[in-house]
Image (cartoon, rainbow, N blue to C red):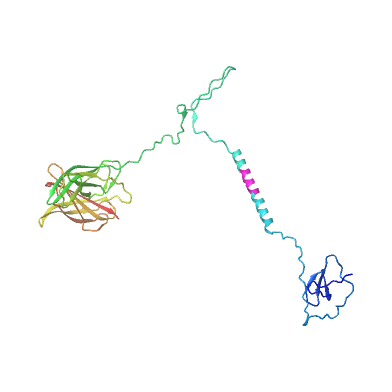
Amino acid sequence: MKALKCTSCGSPDLQFLPGNFARCNSCGNTFAEIPGSAPPTYYEPPPPGYAPPPGPQAFIPPPPPPMWQAPRKSSAAPLLIGVAVALALLITAGAGALVLGVASSPLPTPRYAPTTSPRVSGSSGKPLEDVPLSEENVERPNTSPGVIEKPAPQPKGEFRDVRQAAVGNNLVWVGKYVNTGDTVIVDPSVTVSLFESGGKRVAEQPGFAHRKWLEPGEWTLLMVLVADAPDYARHEIKVNKPRVPSYETKPVKLTVTEWGMRRQFSSNYAIGTVRNSSGKYVKWAQVIVYGFDGQGQPVSVCDSYVTEKELEPGAESGFSVMITTLAVGTAERYEVLAFATPD
């Protein structure tokens, strides 16, 4: 039998290791034996003159041969499969419930019903033709019988009996603002516009009534003053869009018990007394003075407040109102009104 030798140095001094490996005791080379050969059962001494290399000979074990391992199974696969199955069951159950609900729901009620009853043939002859539905032979349901909705009334106002005058460099318009609608108007106002001959607007001035609350059919005098008016060719007067009450409170009318005219410092003053006959506590009582000429046309309007800020029921207060010189004529008659805000 041929002795096994080192594949590196050719030394027969070998050490047999498990797993069909051998290690050379001379050079330390580790190698595999010939596949299928059995380890020798005898020891062949090294040839004459052979000597191991100097130094200690450390034993270096061969690396273990690779071993086959079964692939690891993923722990998430069962969880994903379970979630998919549960989702499929949920979708199937929802679809089944929807189908059952649709099948059991009643048919919708027709919106219109024919006015003519269906024709039924009483003989074995040719049946009568059906009458097709149309707008002429259907009845629309009356959801609120006997009730007819009316649109909300719109506020309306007119500016009447308007007169104009120049007072110095100022232009004055005075007229009667009338509530011609069916609802209350608050803060009545108009606007005067001045234009040149070419149509260019050169002035725009609103005017507001001293009386702030007008019931349907009531009126108040209103003045518009264009101070230091420019040259103009024509003017326009527009009634501003009337406004209905939103947060305003209806004023309380006071009683003017007595009043008279007095000349003081080249001006005329209306001086008198008001009484709170409303039975309510009021404050900020306002006195308005209208001026009319001999034909009853409006010429001026002015206002002021009474002396007392608050008036309890039955209380009185004096007032003094300077008559304005911004008028469109000479006043021959005056009318005095008083209103207050409920407290």
Q: Is residue 5 above or below residue 166?
A: below
Percent position (x, y) of residue 152? 35, 41
Seen from the viewer's position, the closer of residues 219 and 277 is 219
Q: Is residue 146 left or right of residue 11?
A: left
- 175 left or right of 88? left
Please identify the dominant SS of the magenta region.
helix
In the rendered structure, does residue 96 fall within the stretch colored magenta?
A: yes
Identify which residue, 71 or 295, lies in the foreground.
Answer: 71
Q: How many marks?
A: 0
Left or right of 131? Residue 204 is left
- Report the span colored magenta: 88-97
**329 shown above or below 44:** above
User: Residue 18: percent from the left, percent from the top?
Assistant: 82, 71
Q: Is residue 301 magenta?
A: no
Residue 5 occupies quadrant? bottom right
| Front residue (pair 118, 49) | 49
Image quadrant where residue 51 sits: bottom right
Q: Position of residue 161 (x, y in %)?
A: 18, 42
Q: Is residue 277 above or below residue 65?
A: above
Image location of residue 331, percent across then percent down: 12, 47
**Rendered-image quadrant of the C terminus:** bottom left
**Furthest residue in direction bottom, as rendered:** 55
- From the image, which quarter does the N terminus lie in? bottom right
Of the pair 169 and 188, the residue shown nearer to us: 169
